Amino acid sequence: MTEIRDPVHGYVKLEGLMQELANTPQMQRLRWIRQLGLACLVYPGANHTRFEHSLGAYHLAMLLSEHLGLDDEERLKVCAAALLHDVGHGPLSHATESALAPYLRKEHESIIDILKSGELLDVLESHGLCPSDIQSYIRGSGLGQIVSGEIDVDRMDYLIRDAHYTGVAYGVIDRLRLLQKMRLYKGQLMVEAGGVQAATSLLISRLLMHPSVYYHHVCRISECMLSAGIRQMIEDGASAASIKAMDDIQLFTAMDHAGGYAAEMADRIRRRRLFKRTIYVGLECLDPSLIRTSERIVAQELAADAGVDPSYILVDNPPLPDNAMGNFPALVGTQVQHLRDVSPLVSILERAHKATWRFGIYAPSELRERVAQAAKRFLNLKKSTVQHTFSDIDNSYL
């Protein structure tokens, strides 16, 4: 048995299958991939890795599996899925996904290609496990709800861990209470009435962490710059699959070697010479049809109006907030209800989460005013709204 000291959960114990999986090259690669991508540009302490998070998710899965009374085989599969759930991540975690997705057939959760060959396959087969079963659990099928569901060990760990390393005090979740009040009822994972408050605290944490950390404007800007550099590399002949297999250090090295625009974006990020907000508005300010418009088309329209190179206008149209967590089942007596129906606060949180969404257009500081005026015309925004969207405040870290 190996005991690893974790700053969030204390000692995480690895033995047998879990220890062998953790020691494979595929898992060790996660030591060199930041959990929060480029959030360290805002929060210098946010340098924790996917490896740490994977250990944390495994630890919580082990606790929950024991509490639910799963048999040895089920517990082994659930814990293996929790440990391996991020093994297919590209460099800088989610920061590269939007750039790579159009060129790849599968998302990072589709890790069957990684599991069906090499050291991971050897380890799984030596313990009588089938890679497709682990893949199914990672996708949330059956007992995989524990690993990937509306309320799961993945989300529990990353909210607590990200709050710890950023220093943001919003990730306070009573995880032990929540784990204690989870149960399987007719094959479905749900929370008992006594755990509704703990489940609600997780939703509150998620709501507060999104604008403060995950969708902080500096994170969004730097990730858009990184994505633009990667897309240029691919258009110049680089392999998207090869880029996805890199770690963070290898990616920046590849961008430097690519030269041109990709190297410029890498250098700007490294030196924190970031683009600035020209437009940064919520749903209420936008024509709904714009949400479905290609970001490249918007950039080209703005570039033609402003008279600038479209490569230096970055349009950030992130996915709309997902409110599926309110659907999580709660067992109240003998009745199964949605969490939002048991806790009125959850419904309020879902509406508030949607209000944190922002549409952004970014450009270098010297082009900021020209692009802002073009964007105002293109989006038909009021002057006061545009003026409100950018100011000297975004020169600061927070």
Image (tube, rainbow, N blue to C red):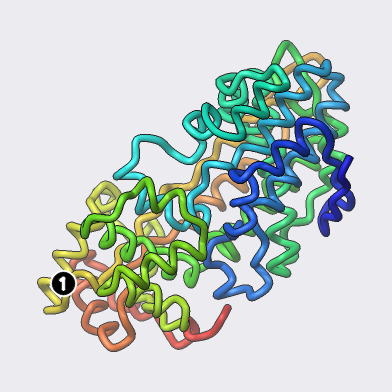
> What residue is at 71 percent from the left and 42 percent from the top?
22
- What residue is pinned by disc 1? 303
Q: Nearer the viewer, residue 381 or 326?
A: 326
Q: Nearer the viewer, residue 128 or 305?
A: 128
**Where does residue 242 sit, x and y in percent of width and height?**
38, 49
**Where does residue 228 sit, x and y in percent of width and height?**
31, 63
Q: Quadrant of residue 281?
A: bottom left
**Where does residue 306 sit, x and y in percent of width and height?**
15, 78
Q: In the image, what residue type sits under mark 1?
A: Ala
Considering only vertical position in the picture, is 113 above or below 265? above
Q: Quadrant of residue 13?
A: top right
Q: Quadrant of residue 149?
A: top right
- In-image side of 283 versus 216 (left or right): left
Considering only vertical position in the picture, is 149 above or below 5? above
**Where does residue 2 sit, x and y in percent of width and height?**
87, 44
- In-image side of 39 versus 346 (left or right): left
Image quadrant for the C terminus? bottom right
Q: Nearer the viewer, residue 213 or 373?
A: 213
Q: Nearer the viewer, residue 100 or 144?
A: 100
Image quadrant for the N terminus? top right
> What residue is at 59 percent from the left and 28 percent from the top?
121
> What residue is at 78 percent from the left and 39 percent from the top?
19
> What residue is at 38 percent from the left and 56 percent from the top?
283
The secondary structure type at the circle numbered 1 is helix
- The crowd level at tag 1 (other Cα within 10 Å; few <14, some 14-19, many 20+) is many
Q: Residue furthest top?
A: 186
Looking at the image, how many numbered discs can be counted on the residues? 1
